[in-house]
Amino acid sequence: MKPNITFLMSSAGTAYGGSETYILNVAKNLSDDFNVGLILGKGKFTNDFNSLADENIIKYLSVPFISRNSKFSALLRKTKLHEKINDFDIEAITIMASTRKINKFISDSDILEVQYPTESLIFPFLQKNIKKIVHFHGPWLPPLYAHSKNIVNKYADAFITCSKWSKKLLEQTHNIENIKVIYNGVDANFFKPGNSEDFTLQQDYNHDLPRIGTVGRLSSAKGTDLLFKVASELEGIAEFFAVGPYEENFIKNNLKKATSNFHFLGPLPNNALPPFYKFIDCFVLPSFEETFPVTVLEAMSCGKPVIASNVGGIPEAIDDGYNGILCETGNYVLLKELILKVINEENLRINISKAARQKVLEKFTIQKTSEELVQFYKNL
């Protein structure tokens, strides 16, 4: 008889992001070993969540909550209160209003794992016989959790994070111990090399120029404004394509910096990402902060050369100059030089692409991630 595991992630069905992608993939891949449940907030569901729900391999509970994309959250971001309680905290707190329903939903669960630290505030109100896990997708603690962790963590049975770098910071800076590192993984049979014929665009662009792509939230933290600057200096030399949701204020303040060779494609569902990676010639992620980004693994798995900031856990995936290229954070001059180097040196592109794909196959498949999780959960 299979054990029961439930994941709690308020934004799992209503937002596109690395953490959301991770939990949907894990929920799907654990279904052979566990009866999997998912607790999430109500709203307009993403195509990725709808695809998983349609497969009927997991059960889920959808409860009311205040989304980070709501008007309330937008107003909150404009106040000083946002320093004490952010919009991700709001999501976590408001989902706790349904604690009675959640307790009923997990009545037969052996394990509950939350994907956002503030969601662990629900632990004291849950049944005592269920094992409780906090999964840190980064070492940056949200305000509410930071103030209450000494109390809440007493109810936690285990902690997980996705990079050695993140574990070290959590231990040294926040005194959180016994953290298990389990790397994010991707489906290498889904994200694989191939041609770009399946990807079409409405935007007008120069088909003869090399294509530089990025995937992720478009913001200063992700270095999108650096890409604006690089693109402006490479107009007529390369075309740039950005996939992902964007922060409204960021776009308003920076849209004028985007030149005609910079194209916003908005968020794409998971099934549209492999064609996008195949469409581009080089993937770039010039972030100022990252833990262990899934997008880097996806691009590597598709056999694309990756240029990414030498920050966070990224060096744990990229061996500089062998299966990818690391760039000094914030150095747009170097970023431009590296992009030119990749698009101008065919042998470099070929060698890095092959090594990148091989690294993913060896260390970062979703199957490997799932196997490590299964063993961890069963030991727990």
Image: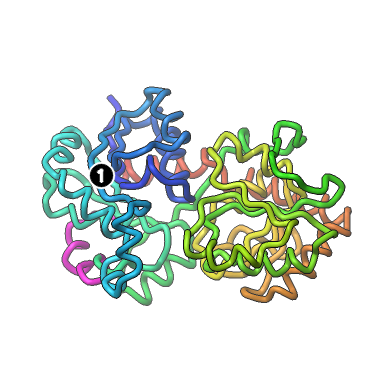
Q: Viewer-proximal residue, 206 or 333? A: 206
Q: Is residue 65 magenta?
A: no
Q: Where is residue 353 shown, x and y percent of the image?
A: 76, 50
Asked if residue 227 is positioned above or below residue 1 in the image, the reply reads below
Q: Is residue 150 magenta?
A: yes
Q: Viewer-proximal residue, 22 or 47? A: 47
Q: Residue at x 73, y 63 (%)?
A: 231
Query: To which residue does mark 1 refer?
Result: 112
The magenta region covers: 145-158
Q: Where is residue 61 shown, x and y percent of the image?
A: 25, 34
Element class at badge 1: strand
Q: Residue at x 18, y 53 (%)?
A: 122
**Quarter holding residue 110:** top left
Within 10 Å of disc 1 (Cα), the crowding (few <14, some 14-19, many 20+) is: many
Q: Residue at x 61, y 47 (%)?
A: 265
Residue 75 shows in the view? yes
